[in-house]
Amino acid sequence: MARRVRRPLGPLDIRSQAILRAVIEEYVTTAQPVGSQALVDRYGLGVSSATVRNILAELEMAGLLTHPHTSAGRVPTDSGYRFYVESIVDAVPLPAVEQLMIRHQFGQVEFASEHWFRLAATTLAGLTRSAGLATPAKPRAAHIRRVDLVAVNERMASLILVLREGAIKQAIVTIEGPEAVEQATLNQVAGLLNERLNDSTVASAEAAIDAFDETDPVQRIARRVGERIIRILRDYDAAAVEEVFSDGLLNVMEAPEFAQSDKLRQVFSALENRAYLGELVGSVAGSGRIRIVIGAENPREEMHDVTLILAPYGRPGRALGVVGVLGPTRMSYPNAIGTVSFVSGLMNELVDHLYA
Amino acid sequence: MARRVRRPLGPLDIRSQAILRAVIEEYVTTAQPVGSQALVDRYGLGVSSATVRNILAELEMAGLLTHPHTSAGRVPTDSGYRFYVESIVDAVPLPAVEQLMIRHQFGQVEFASEHWFRLAATTLAGLTRSAGLATPAKPRAAHIRRVDLVAVNERMASLILVLREGAIKQAIVTIEGPEAVEQATLNQVAGLLNERLNDSTVASAEAAIDAFDETDPVQRIARRVGERIIRILRDYDAAAVEEVFSDGLLNVMEAPEFAQSDKLRQVFSALENRAYLGELVGSVAGSGRIRIVIGAENPREEMHDVTLILAPYGRPGRALGVVGVLGPTRMSYPNAIGTVSFVSGLMNELVDHLYA
DNA sequence: TGTTAGCACTCTCACCCATCGAGTGCTAAC
DNA sequence: GTTAGCACTCGATGGGTGAGAGTGCTAACA
């Protein structure tokens, strides 16, 4: 046994892998520490419980399992799950029937709307019995596609800014001046802005706005509105993530490990913090691959009891969003990974229409 | 004592009211059943604990207090809170400093934007240590103010619909036809729609769209887009509430009565159900007054352990929204009511600018 | 040399029981 | 009408105990 200590993370023989797998899958379904006898009874291992015990001890040495206390069964560690995900199992693809059903549902909902992302989150939550997360695809830098101004009352107008990838920003602008604002004037202002700012980013828009002539009444208003547009673009570019849609946080609450709710409360707090999610999503979006963060692998301490599985979608260099799930570390990884892969693939495919 | 049984909800004498008040206020701060001795010690009642016990027994007969078990102190019932709110205490207005601070914060945030309602929810949550709720003011029936179309690719356009009170709806429309769609064509279509649909509701828009000539290519597209617009307006009118912003659900989770989390989970489920909130908000918006729903007064069983305090804001007959808080029945009613009143009053005042 | 049976050992969990104390309701005196 | 006194109730606390699950080790076995 001492020999094994020397290779704590080396390749495991087939039998050890089978047993690790059995422990994890048993634990995932029962949420109870797994004993050697239970493994022999429920999985056809072909060896006695004593042998299984020896191997369990080795796996514990290697840091893949632990012991809540002496007389309890084994529980996977975060490293155990990691090894399981990377070397033992493959993602289980979503059944074809479910795939069809989901495609159908996405077809029913208004294309690329808010409901779309809600649906993604809801779907993920339902399929994995965890919390589902989805962010709209966000361009790296905003490009103005169109500006529109609608009079609200004599001094205020609603500014509508359409960005290249379909996002819309709205703001109320106050227009100071001696006279009441007419919609006709606003149309002129909007026309001017559309002409000068078409396809601008922050930098080019700034230059264009500087060129407006303060003495001309229409250009003067255009300048004010333009300054507001710049502010909106700046805010937009600065945020890594515009919004995160989530669903099924209740699913996570139902897991027995969160019965005390203290831990989960912290998770909720962390999720309310957009900066953190933004950062995480940013890192996933950049990588281009599915990312799995298991328990304590997460730098945030609040998240040490949960696992995040996130996958990007969209077009690298243009607009990227993320979908994923959040659940207890004790989750069915093959299914969750398969589901997240499918949904991100689907979003990818559907969003492609926009860039065709 | 038997005499008192005959008038269970009749007017209470001053001393009984003072004791009910003391029980409630003590219970609100300690979350522990209140005993007769504790009342004598902490509130200058001028009588002995035995006398207090007699009165507590009367209050219990009247249904205003209960007993978790024989040897425990008293706990207010929902009726107890109701009586307290209606006959014993008045709302405590928010301190002037706080009022100023909040006004300032609202001034900082983009007018009537999504952030605005988030701020309302956050403010309410922070001031009352409960969950804060806010819905944007929603007009009774949608009126079209402006239609805009922006080409996304050769077959798709982004439809932007601005409604009279400032709401914006977006959709992607697919335009079938032999030729690729040009932005110039879309501008013509949008122009036509703006001309014919200005200030329409569902009914008048339908008539106008029926009048389009299918043989003219621009009108044909306008008709397709118009049909989509009708669908959007229908959805909009059908929903009593467009969106509910909430914040501070964690505050409620922290209350000792929800430590087990089972009850709270149900509350969360109920809140996720928009139909329910819509209905509630609808009833409040119509009434024009602040509405307090204490525990089991709520028809939904899940909400039997929480109290809702909701107040409408906006212009009756035009657009109405609701702000409020959700907390455990054991909450500080005078402060919560004062806070909700202030915030709804502030929203009212600010929103008035839009209709000036 | 790996596998297995057997067994002592450890530790948690559920249960019981006694004790404590907070708080009540009632009675009798003031 | 108020109060002191007192018996009584009942949850909470804590120690003690037995059952059971599961381990680790040893020695025998193939």
Image: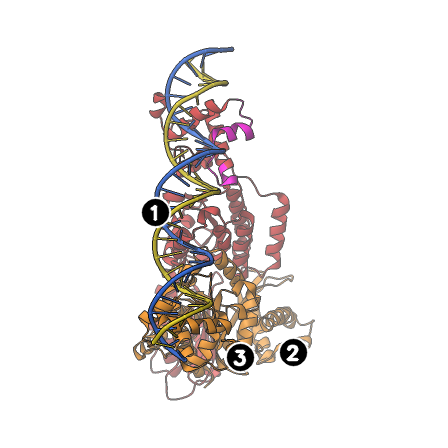
Chain colours: A red, B orange, C yellow, D blue
Chain containing the residue with disc 3:
B
Would you identify the image quadrant in which residue B14 lies? bottom left
Q: Which residue is mark 1?
A: A299
List the residue tagged with mark 3. Answer: B7
Question: Of the residues shown, which amino acid type is indicated by label 2?
Answer: Ala
Callout 2 secondary element:
helix
Q: Is residue A274 visible?
A: yes
- Residue C24 rendering spot, x and y as whole percentages: 44, 66
Part of the protein shown in magenta: A27-47
Q: Residue at x 51, y 40 (%)?
A: A30
Cα–Cα gap, marks 3 and 1: 63 Å
In this rendering, the answer to whether C13 lies above or below A105 is above
Q: Secondary structure at mark 3?
A: loop
Q: Position of residue A289 (x, y in %)?
A: 45, 44
Q: Secondary structure at mark 1?
A: loop
The disc numbered 2 marks a residue on which chain? B
- Gap between marks 2 and 1, in whole Å? 56 Å
Residue type marked 3? Arg
Of B286 and C16, which appears nearest the observer? Answer: C16
| Residue A83 on the magenta span | no
**Callout 1 amino acid:** Pro
Q: How many marks?
A: 3
Chain of residue at mark 1: A
For image coordinates 56% across by 64% down, the residue present is B301
Position of B304 with respect to B91 (left or right) is right
Residue A94's x, y, as percent?
A: 58, 43
Nearest the eye: A284 or A129: A129
